[in-house]
Image (spheres, helix red, strand yellow):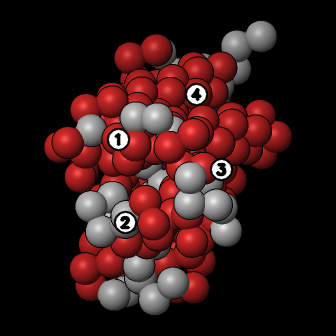
Amino acid sequence: MLRSAAHLFRQRGVEATSLADVIDHAGAPRGSIYHHFPGGKTQLVEEATRTAGTVMSSMISAGLASAGPSATVRAIIDGFRSELLATDFVAGCPVAPAALEGLHAPGAVAAAGESFSSWEDVIAASLWQRGLVRERSYTLATFAIAAIEGAQILAKAQRSTTALDRTEKELLALLEAVLDASNHPRP
């Protein structure tokens, strides 16, 4: 059900997704939602957001460890670009809906904030390992996440991947310049 909820929240938003929608999408029995989520939709939104954030954090971490920052940024943007095109510019970040629509679910907003912070930590640690000072690592990590999240919103509104394309180009150029300048990997 968490996977179905995250999928529907990405496409429809939190407010436009009902518990019945999640049950139907998951193919679950009607009574199961309150068995697994006694807190109702509020709990479901929080747990789906937390799970989606953890999955994304693991993907970012694995990409950084195996391919490095530039390839990981490229892969993240490619993934969002593909998802937007496949869904006719409907789906976006799996965590953003809770951050943007979580007025009645403060736990979900907190889960979104924790997810974004986790992504910042993972990216900053990777940049620090490649020789950047800690503050600069966090600044770039925050900038990268904010740029990608903002580019997704522009892409949805403009029904075009141009914002993602431009963001990718500039982020990759910035990362290359900064990493070339630091060129002092830490053990």
Q: Which mark is residue 122?
A: 4
Where 160 sits versus 95, above or below? below
Question: How far separated are the C-alphas under marks 4 and 1?
Answer: 28 Å
Q: Are marks 3 and 1 in contact (CB under 8 Å)?
A: no
> Given contact means CB atoms under 8 Å apart, are the residues at marks 4 and 3 in contact?
no
Q: Secondary structure at mark 3?
A: helix
N-terminal of the pair, mark 3 or mark 1, is 1
**Residue drawn 58% across and 21% down?**
125
> Residue 30 is drawn in which quadrant?
bottom right
Residue 72, which numbered label?
A: 3
Vertical arrangement, residue 74 with respect to residue 118, above or below: below
Q: Which residue is mark 1?
A: 42
Label pair 2/4, CB-CB below 8 angstroms: no
Kind of residue at disc 4: Val
User: Which quadrant, please, contains the C terminus?
Assistant: top right
Q: Viewer-proximal residue, 19 or 156? A: 19
Indicate the amino acid at tag 1. Answer: Thr
